[in-house]
Amino acid sequence: MRSVISTIMSAFKALARVGLALVSAPFRMLSGAVGPVTREPIPEVAPPVETTPEAPVDHTETYRKIAIALQGWAAESILADEPQPVPTSWPRSVQVWAQGLDREEAFAIIDAPESAVVGHISSLFAMPRVRALQSLRTAKWAKQEPMSDPCSAVPGLAATAAAL
């Protein structure tokens, strides 16, 4: 059944092509007598504009400013004995990393030279005692007991200081 329907459809298609050719033949002869149809010339594609390769952007100054701010943030966090809110002006990678630093890492950031912090946050090299720049969970610092008075450990020093 399927082959019969397919044969009938092929016959109709062939008949339609013949009919279309017969109907369009006078128009094709007329257009040939008039001459070729003039078409607008296809516009040429403009040559590609010579692009100069972009010079790499130097982020050294930006990293330096972030390193200074990070050291200040670490100092404020240690003085407050808890991590302080991370500034939203910092890059996202530094924000999610800084919020997870512990007290020892904050001390290491404060003690490190500025160039070491710049290298660490720009992922050029790692700082000792500080985890790599990565997404960290927000850290909770345990309360630190205040240091005892160094003068009370040496009785002679306390007595001398009180005598003055």
Image: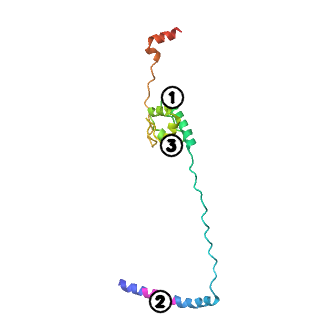
Q: Is residue 42 above or below residue 143?
A: below
The amino acid on which the numbered mark 2 sits, given as a three-letter code, is Leu
- Can you tell which mark lies on residue 36? none
User: Is the C-beta separation of discs 1 and 3 under 8 Å?
Assistant: no
Query: Tag 3: Cα neighbours inside 10 Å, few (<14), some, or many (≥20)?
Result: some
Q: Nearer the viewer, mark 1 or mark 3?
A: 3
Secondary structure beneath disc 1?
Answer: helix
Q: Nearer the viewer, mark 2 or mark 3?
A: 3
Please tell me whether residue 17 belongs to the stretch shown in magenta.
yes
Query: Tag 2: Cα neighbours inside 10 Å, few (<14), some, or many (≥20)?
Result: few
What whole-number distance in Å separates the C-alpha atoms at marks 1 and 3?
A: 26 Å
Q: Is residue 89 visible?
A: no
What whole-number distance in Å separates the C-alpha atoms at marks 2 and 1?
A: 94 Å
Q: Position of residue 136 (x, y in %)?
A: 44, 41
Q: Earlier in the sequence, mark 2 or mark 3?
A: 2
Quickly name the residue at label 3: 122
- The residue lying at 51 percent from left, 28 percent from top is 79
The amino acid on which the numbered mark 3 sits, given as a three-letter code, is Ser
The amino acid on which the numbered mark 1 sits, given as a three-letter code, is Leu
Q: Position of residue 147 (x, y in %)?
A: 45, 22
- The residue lying at 55 percent from left, 39 percent from top is 64
Q: Is residue 43 above or below residue 127?
A: below
Query: Tag 1: Cα neighbours inside 10 Å, few (<14), some, or many (≥20)?
Result: few
Quickly name the residue at label 1: 79
Q: Tell me: 78 left or right of 37.
A: left
Q: Tell me: 32 left or right of 140.
A: right
Q: Tell me: 34 left or right of 95.
A: right
Q: Which residues are drawn in magenta?
A: 10-19
Q: Nearer the viewer, residue 36 or 78?
A: 36
Q: Earlier in the sequence, mark 2 or mark 1?
A: 2
- Can you tell which mark lies on residue 15? 2
